Amino acid sequence: MNTQDGHKIYFTQKEMALRWNISESCVKNYREQGKIPFFRMPGSNRVLYPVKGIEEIEAQNTISAKEVVKRTKPTEIKKEKPGVSSTPKKWRI
């Protein structure tokens, strides 16, 4: 949906799915979980997503390479050589 000056003010569910490269059902799930803002006209089934709200969510959740935490080396597991027990075992035959 466009304004008079040609700028979008709402995305459709299909446009949201294409924008985020997810299925339309994922967009619906995000909406139902309250993770993304939406607009629905009373008495209508058409759902629209405000561009400004979506862009704010994208900005808040965009991670730059500098913010990525480097992983530390996994803790090393001390390996022991198998040995022979010092106590003799009694075998049953």
Image (cartoon, rainbow, N blue to C red):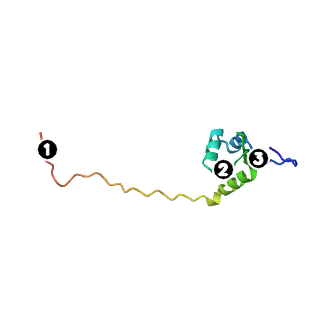
Where is residue 27, by image quadrant?
top right
Please indicate whether residue 42 sits to the left or right of residue 83 in the image.
right
- Between disc 2 and disc 1, whose residue precedes? 2
Q: Are marks 2 and 1 in contact (CB under 8 Å)?
A: no
For the point 56% across and 59% down, which residue is it?
70
Count every numbered label the image shows and give the total.
3
Q: Amino acid at mark 1?
A: Trp
Q: Amino acid at mark 2?
A: Ile
* Crowdedness near tag 1: few (<14), some (14–19) or many (≥20) residues, C-alpha within 10 Å: few
Please indicate whether residue 18 sits to the left or right of residue 2 in the image.
left
According to the picture, the residue beneath numbered tag 2 turns out to be 36
CA–CA distance between discs 1 and 3? 80 Å
Q: Which mark is residue 28?
A: none
For the point 72% across and 40% down, which residue is it?
44
Q: Nearer the viewer, mark 2 or mark 1?
A: 2
According to the picture, the residue beneath numbered tag 1 turns out to be 91
Q: Quadrant of the C terminus?
A: top left
Please indicate whether residue 3 sits to the left or right of residue 57 in the image.
right
CA–CA distance between discs 2 and 1? 69 Å
According to the picture, the residue beneath numbered tag 3 turns out to be 10
Q: Are marks 3 and 2 in contact (CB under 8 Å)?
A: no
CA–CA distance between discs 3 and 2? 13 Å
Q: Nearer the viewer, mark 1 or mark 3?
A: 3
For the point 72% across and 44% down, which residue is it?
42
Q: Position of residue 28 (x, y in %)?
A: 64, 42
Residue 20 seen from this side:
yes
